[in-house]
Amino acid sequence: MNTALLVFLIILGILLFPIIWTFVIAKIARRIYPFPIPHFMTEVIDNPVRRKYIQKPDQIAQRMGAAPGNIVVEVGPGKGSYTKAVARKIEPEGVVYAIDIQQPILDKLQVRIDEAGIKNIIPKLDDAYNLDFDDNSVDIIFAIACLPEIPKPVKVLKEFKRILKPGGIISLCELFIDPDYPLRRTEKKWADEASLILEEEFGNWFSYQLNFSKH
Ligand SMILES: C[S@@+](CC[C@H](N)C(=O)[O-])C[C@H]1O[C@@H](n2cnc3c(N)ncnc32)[C@H](O)[C@@H]1O
């Protein structure tokens, strides 16, 4: 191995070391004591690298089949990049209800959508276990890097199923660098336990998107 490559690998190792340890510690801590991601962290995870190369908002919105007039629920919108991409696809009559259990996340989202002049996103304080929506009332429900952070994902999926219209889609996206990242087969197992049907899947081991329907 030449010296330049060795030096490069050593520097890379030094730079990555704190990131890897932070990831491992976060994973262990969240296994012992599940808690929602602190709201400031949603600012960090929704970054330009992720949006440009890994989880492209427009592509994710397209893959879930968002179309004009849809009624959509997003659980855990974070900074709202994916919320906005879906909102654009369902204009002019469609609405995205962006729900979260943390009010500060919704407050920041409201400021962003006001600044952007977007009218069809409604931030709403709500709990994924017990959503304030009627049975069979929503065309699309989506959650990005969110479901595995909730301690009882199957219970949440059953609640999604309750509010989903027949013919509607539940779209789940996961990302490997999320400390709560589940394997694709784990998420499919949860969906199976909630009696959902896998319709389509996209992506790879690092970042994937699964679309489910109900009977
Ligand atoms: C990791 S963030 C998702 C951020 C965003 N989707 C993204 O990909 O950038 C997960 C969000 O889920 C929310 N959350 C956790 N448990 C919840 C629950 N039971 N009901 C609704 N939202 C919940 C958290 O408050 C947090 O804002």
Image: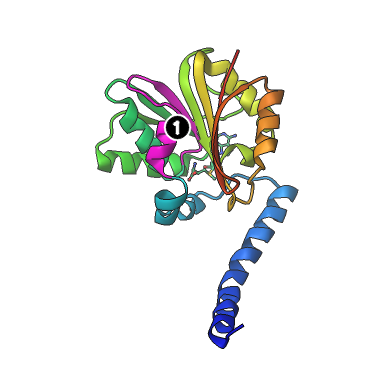
Q: Position of residue 155 (x, y in %)?
A: 67, 26
Residue 108 located left or right of residue 196: left
Residue 184: quarter of image: top right
Identify which residue is drawn at 47% across, 39% down.
Answer: 103
Task: Report how many numbered discs are placed on residues in the image.
Answer: 1
* Label 1 crowd (10 A; few <14 / some 14-19 / many >=20): some
**Where residue 123 sits: x, y (%)?**
41, 33
Q: What range is drawn magenta here?
A: 56-77
Residue in the picture at 47% in, 55% down: 44
Mark 1 — residue?
63
Q: Position of residue 20 (x, y in %)?
A: 63, 64
Amino acid on which the number 1 mark rests in the picture: Arg
Farthest bottom residue in view: 3
Q: Give the image location of residue 90, x and y in percent.
A: 33, 25
Q: Is residue 204 magenta?
A: no
Q: Ligand 1: which quarter?
A: top right
- Residue at the outermost front position: 1
Mark 1 residue element: helix
Query: Seen in the image, is 31 located left or right of residue 23?
Result: right
- Residue depicted at 58% across the width and 85% down the height: 2
